Amino acid sequence: MDLKKWTLVLFTAMLMMVIAACGSDNDVEEGAATPPVEETAPPAETSPVEEESQDEVPTAEELLQRSVEASANLKSFAMNADIKQHIVVEGEQSQEQNVDMVLESEITMDPMEMMQIIEMDTAEGKVEMKQYIMEDGIYVEMDNQWMKIPQEQEQEIRDSMDMANAGPDQQLEQFKSIAQDTTVTEEGDVYILTADVSGDNLKEIAKSMMSQAGNDPQMEAMMEQMDIKSVSLVYGVHKETYLPTTTDLDMVLELEAEGEKVTLEMKMKSTYSKYDEIDQIEVPEEALNAQ
């Protein structure tokens, strides 16, 4: 198995999962983004019992619902991610590799466009790439050279972005299966959801989310053979806006592919910022002139 291809396939799927958490749905009512707590803020004369009730920490399901609703009308955001992967391939030619990635991205939801700066460290060296995924084309810079992705190769990338338009109801359904395994705590002005999940529920939610990252037959075959051993997820949500602040994801999985066994350990730390501060993604002139 090609370690580079496996790394990029999984990375693309995981990135799209993150984007989906901030996905938009044009069918959501305009008022959906208004945090429920603010809508029901008690008047000054509210009794102490009622005030105490409103100060209670929400359940995981309540917090997920509010976060999904608050994210529904987002116009743009930025995300930084630090990803560390340890990959072991056992077969006729066993391989082992550590892959570290740093990702900076700016994303607009309508139109769905994205700028990404990716740095990847492997045993073979360091790779730096910048790309713009736009409505009129996909532009990539490597080794100080710009190129435009051929139109016939664009669709797989655009399919991967489609899941960002998944509606809040769909996203919530995916998380409901792990709500019972999730605890909610407080750290300053942030709610922290923590889940350590394993078993069939985990496998189904991971397959559901990753399957939205495209219709690539090889990826579908990989997902069918995945044995997800464990996932630890820590998800930060701002108390006032209910928008995500951070995500920490630890995952261990195994799969059989092309007669080989692949074991992956991945740690991904993400931070979110610039909510609705990015008006549009602008492609450099030299990229627009690329062939």
Image (tube, rainbow, N blue to C red):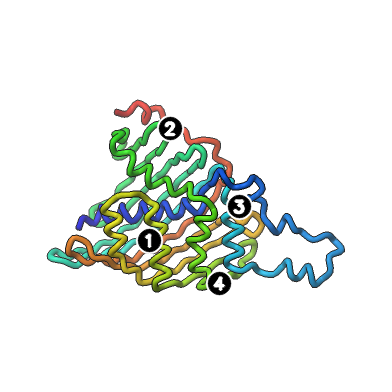
Amino acid beneath label 1 = Lys
Whether residue 173 is visible to the viewer of this picture, yes or no, is yes
Going from the N terminus, do you reach mark 2 or mark 4 first?
4
Pair 1/2: label in front = 1
Badge 2: residue crowd in 10 Å (few <14, some 14–19, many ≥20): some
Badge 3: residue crowd in 10 Å (few <14, some 14–19, many ≥20): many
In the picture provided, is 230 more to the left or to the right than 167? left
In the picture provided, is 18 more to the left or to the right than 121? right
Element at label 1: helix
User: Could you tell me which residue is drawn at 30 percent across and 48 percent down?
Assistant: 127
- Marks 3/2 in contact by CB < 8 Å: the verdict is no
Distance from the alpha carbon under mark 2 to that under mark 4? 42 Å
Amino acid beneath label 3 = Ala
Going from the N terminus, do you reach mark 1 or mark 4 first?
4
Badge 4: residue crowd in 10 Å (few <14, some 14–19, many ≥20): some
Pair 2/4: label in front = 4
**Residue 252: x and y, percent?**
35, 68
Q: Mark 4 points at which residue?
A: 183
Check the image and report above or below for 18 versus 30.
below
Amino acid beneath label 2 = Val
Q: Mark 3 points at which residue?
A: 70
Distance from the alpha carbon under mark 3 to that under mark 2? 29 Å
Distance from the alpha carbon under mark 1 to that under mark 4? 23 Å
Residue 207 is marked as 1
Residue 283 is marked as 2
Pair 1/4: label in front = 1
Check the image and report above or below for 284 versus 27.
above
Going from the N terminus, do you reach mark 3 or mark 2 first?
3
Along the viewing direction, whichever of 34 and 279 lies nearer the viewer? 34
Element at label 3: helix
- Marks 2/4 in contact by CB < 8 Å: the verdict is no
